[in-house]
Amino acid sequence: MSQQRIDCMYEACPIPLLKALKKLKTMKVGEVLIMETDHSCSITNVVEWAKKQGHEVDYVEISDGEWEIYIEKKQ
């Protein structure tokens, strides 16, 4: 399974969401996008958006106040 990463550190919404949308358009079904972020609003916004689009989503706090959001493209 191929993975691609985007760095959204120090960026507030909607920039992380827009970056994810742009990147997912270039990816194939089954590939995983890993988004690095330090804004908790990204967790809410990106996760909700990705689920509504039908993608598999999970996230992990990798450090205090820093997260990785995993989005597996499903369509």
Image (tube, rainbow, N blue to C red):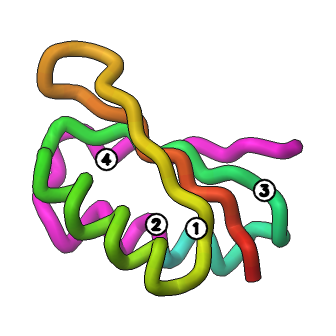
Residue 34 appears left or right of 3: left
Amino acid type, label 4: Cys
The image position of residue 42, as x and y in percent, is 22, 57
The image position of residue 27, as x and y in percent, is 75, 68
Image quadrant where residue 30 sits: bottom right
In this figure, which residue is indicated by the disc labeled 4? Answer: 8
In this figure, which residue is indicated by the disc labeled 2? Answer: 20
Query: Which residues fall within the magenta stretch?
Result: 1-20
Q: In this view, does 16 lie above or below 35?
A: below
Please tell me which of labels 2 and 3 falls first in the chain.
Answer: 2
Please tell me which of labels 4 and 2 falls first in the chain.
Answer: 4
Q: Residue furthest top?
A: 63
In the image, which disc is placed on residue 31? 3
Distance between the alpha carbons at the discs numbered 3 and 4: 19 Å
Distance between the alpha carbons at the discs numbered 2 and 3: 13 Å
The image position of residue 8, as x and y in percent, is 31, 47
In this figure, which residue is indicated by the disc labeled 1? Answer: 23
